[in-house]
Image (cartoon, rainbow, N blue to C red):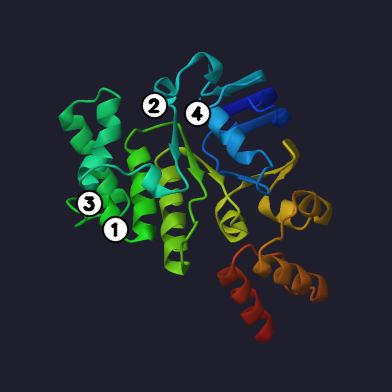
Amino acid sequence: MTDIISVEGLWFNYPNGVTALRGIDLKLAEGGIAALIGQNGSGKTTLAKMMNGLLKPTKGTVKVANIDTAGKETYQLAKYVGYSFQNPTHQLYEKSVETELMAGPLNLGCSTEEAQSRAAAAVELFSLKGLEQIRPSALPFPLKKVVCIAAVYTMQPRVMMLDEPTTGQDHVGLRMIQNAVGKIRSMGITPVIISHDMRLVAESVETVVVMALGKIVRIGTPVEIFLDEETMEKAALRPPQILELSAKLDAAYPRHGGVSENVEEEVSKIERMAAGK
């Protein structure tokens, strides 16, 4: 696979003297789904902002689609990497969902016809039919988050950074976000999720990047990371409850069939064991 993101020897110091990143090396493959996890202050959001040019390296390099972000302004990188903010009120400003979805393409220099076409495609892809003329600020919170993601999608970036996409979401909202992430990937865009939601990470991503104190602690699959007690302790994180339960059942019952990352899969395994299969 081709690396869509390449970070080498990255250090970053804020103007107040705080060193937020300390010698980061990271490569993420195009077409995958990755997550950056860690406690507040671990450096994950700072690293994400380095990838779209909001912040520039103190030392080292960050490349997205083989483009060095240090030499580009954020608007120049928008066609390569998009950023969906944690708080949708920081992103939504148009009078209707339709014009919100058109704003990004128009800012990139697309014609009105092309912007309308991209907005219509996003409405279909993210199940926003019937909401086109509603003011985004009037939508329920879960839908605001989906509109934010769809608005970044219309810019057709190679990478989409999703900052805490499930903050404030209920179960239905979580499923909406998971579906949106899956649709993004199906269209050839590489999602990178910044999240404290370990359930979302367990169920939705392939590569987990664990950060603590400005460094990468470990990179692996969700199961590898969440079952590594030392790594989780360093990051001050807890694995999803379903994965903890599944690991204990797998250790106790040889017929269990491996550790599950989601509730549905674990329920199926328990039902098979109960049926004697």
Mark earlier in primary sequence (2, 3): 2
Mark earlier in primary sequence (1, 4): 4
Relative to 185, 100 lies left or right: left
Residue on which disc 4 sits? 52
Callout 2 amino acid: Lys
**Which is more N-terminal, label 3 or label 4?**
4
Q: Secondary structure at mark 1?
A: loop
Report, in whole angstroms, how far the alpha carbon at label 2 lies from the one at label 3.
Answer: 25 Å
Total of numbered circles in the picture?
4
Residue 267 is marked as none
Quadrant in which residue 127 is drawn: bottom left
Q: Quadrant of residue 184?
A: top left
The residue tagged with tag 3: helix, strand or loop? Answer: loop
Task: State the separation of the CA atoms marked 2 and 1.
Answer: 27 Å
| Residue type, label 3 | Arg
Instruction: Name which residue lies at 41% across and 52% down.
Output: 180
- For the residues bearing labels 4 and 3, Cβ distance under 8 angstroms: no
**Disc ID at residue 135:** 3
Badge 2 density bin: few <14, some 14–19, many ≥20, Cα 10 Å: some
User: Type of residue at label 4?
Assistant: Asn
* Local SS, label 4: loop
Q: Which mark lies nearer to you, 2 or 1?
A: 1
Q: Viewer-proximal residue, 180 or 42?
A: 42
> Contact, CB < 8 Å: mark 3 with mark 1?
yes
Distance in Å between CA atoms under marks 4 and 3? 28 Å
Please tell me the numbered disc located at residue 79: 2
